[in-house]
Amino acid sequence: MTKQNRITIGIVIGLLLIVGGHSLFQSRHTITNPSQQHNKKINSTEPAANNNQMKITVNNRTIEATMADNSSAKAFLDWLDEGDQTLTLEDFEGMEKVGNLHKQFPTNDTPTNTEAGDLILYQGNKFVMYYGHNSWNFTRLGKMEGISATELKQLLGRGNVTVTLEHN
């Protein structure tokens, strides 16, 4: 075995130990203040109860979205705090609209079954609005509220659509 191979193996083992230790810390972390238990979730993919909201404007209609409680959604909202973002989303497979973010975000991929209204981060650099169903390893960003699957599909229409994202 060459010296470079031994170094590479050492680095990989070290990274595995760091990731494993981080996971162990998260699984043992508890919240001691009962009033915080309702609002805090560690590394959750469910929408947060702490009112992290985003506005999505499509074809002159604004939709509220509740963001997930994970590092991806937090980074996404921090990005929106720098200014509103306007994206062009392309239709894909008659179930989603996808747009390039031109920026890499942290991912929290888990096996996910999407439904209409889900907001997904794909490959760390693509924003996806679902109006249909899909199953894959995705990072959940949030969920649109107050709009049915039928209304959403009609609002998004066929082909490309321009959306503006804003952190409330």
Image (cartoon, rainbow, N blue to C red):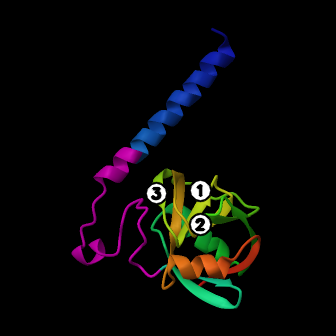
Q: Earlier in the sequence, mark 2 or mark 1?
A: 2
Residue at the spot of label 3: 113
Amino acid type, label 3: Asn
Front residue (pair 127, 105): 127
Residue picked out by circle 1: 106
Q: Is residue 49 left or right of residue 92?
A: left
Q: Where is residue 5 in the image (x, y as percent from the top left)?
A: 64, 17
The quarter holding residue 39 reads bottom left
Magenta-span inclusion, residue 40: yes
Asked if the magenta segment contains residue 134, the reply would be no
Q: State which mark lies toward you, 3 or 1.
A: 3
| In the rendered image, the vertical position of residue 114 relative to residue 48, given as above or below | above
Q: Where is residue 3 in the image (x, y as percent from the top left)?
A: 66, 14
Q: Which amino acid does label 2 sit on?
A: Ala
| Image coordinates for residue 74, horizontal then vertical, percent | 54, 68
Q: How many badges with numbers are in the image?
A: 3
Looking at marks 2 and 3 on the same chain, the residue that comes earlier in the sequence is marked by 2
Q: Residue sitting at 45 percent across and 35 percent down?
A: 17
